[in-house]
Image (cartoon, helix red, strand yellow):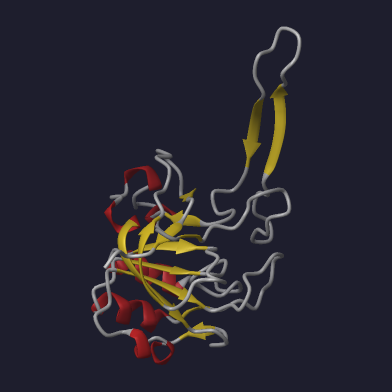
């Protein structure tokens, strides 16, 4: 069974939103006389790399990631290509692949996922988030840093997620994934109070 790893590598070179916490790793123990194991300490924003935002990320009175239902992060999924769509993914960029949509929809906007921070990435138009929910989506994902533009202060697409009770994945790598249907596995960690969690997101081909 073929597997697509759709998570970017995470290191100190991973791009983060300006002002966010970069990935750092320090060794607190190394194998040597009297020490049988290597042990590290890691500091990072939970939004580094492929990640799942919690409702708490965009609403003070909402669930942290450790309390969300895992069901949306596991199951049938469709990858839709909207490469070169411009600043916002509109309904017109997705409708060609909308027939019989499964509950999870991942949108590829890049020919190659960004290796450094860029401000002009593609995001979701708020009405597109609503349209996907009306098609039965419970989770949406994108291969850029956010479902909202980098300069947004109102986070309209995030607020649509909150209103419609949708889950979201950001910073995916869909460079080598053909448009079509897959099984998604992208479980967030049970970080009790966190506003997001890293995921190791993969797609598996669906057996006929």
Quarter of the picture holding the N terminus: bottom left
Q: Quadrant of residue 32?
A: top right
Relative image position of residue 144 (x, y in whole percent): 56, 70
Which residue is pictured at 65% across the width and 14% down the height? 36
Relative image position of residue 187 (x, y in whole percent): 39, 49
Is residue 208 placed above or below 101 in the rendered structure?
A: above
| Image label count | 0
Is residue 188 placed above or below 58 in the rendered structure?
A: above
Relative image position of residue 207 (x, y in whole percent): 30, 64
| Front residue (pair 85, 5) | 5
Relative image position of residue 85 (x, y in whole percent): 53, 88
Q: Quadrant of residue 98?
A: bottom left
| Front residue (pair 24, 5) | 5
Which residue is pictured at 54% across the width and 57% down the height? 7
Q: Quadrant of residue 175?
A: bottom right
Which residue is pictured at 43% across the width and 87% down the height? 90
| Residue at far right of view | 33
Quarter of the picture holding the C terminus: bottom left
Is residue 165 placed above or below 22 in the rendered structure?
A: below
| Front residue (pair 28, 113) | 113
Which residue is pictured at 34% across the width and 68% down the height? 77
| Residue at far top of view | 34
Side of 124 where 173 appears, left or right: right
């Amino acid at each position: 069974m073929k597997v697509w790893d759709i998570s970017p590598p995470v290191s100190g070179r991973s791009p983060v939103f300006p002002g966010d916490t970069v990935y750092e790793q320090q060794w607190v123990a190394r194998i040597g006389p009297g020490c049988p194991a290597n042990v590290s300490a890691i500091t990072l924003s939970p939004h580094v790399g492929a990640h799942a935002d919690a409702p708490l990320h965009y609403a003070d009175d909402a669930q942290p990631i450790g309390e969300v239902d895992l069901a949306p992060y596991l199951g049938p999924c469709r990858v839709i290509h909207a490469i070169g769509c411009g600043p916002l993914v509109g309904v017109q960029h997705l409708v060609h692949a909308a027939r019989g949509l499964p509950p999870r929809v991942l949108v590829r906007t890049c020919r190659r996922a960004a290796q450094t921070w860029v401000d002009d990435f593609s995001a979701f138009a708020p009405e597109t988030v609503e349209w996907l929910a009306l098609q039965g989506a419970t989770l949406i994902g994108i291969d850029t840093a956010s479902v909202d533009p980098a300069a947004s202060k109102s986070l309209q697409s995030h607020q649509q997620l909150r209103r419609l009770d949708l889950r979201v994945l950001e910073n995916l790598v869909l460079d080598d994934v053909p448009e079509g249907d897959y099984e998604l596995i992208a479980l967030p960690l049970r970080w009790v109070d966190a506003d997001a969690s890293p995921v190791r997101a993969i797609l598996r081909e669906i057996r006929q």
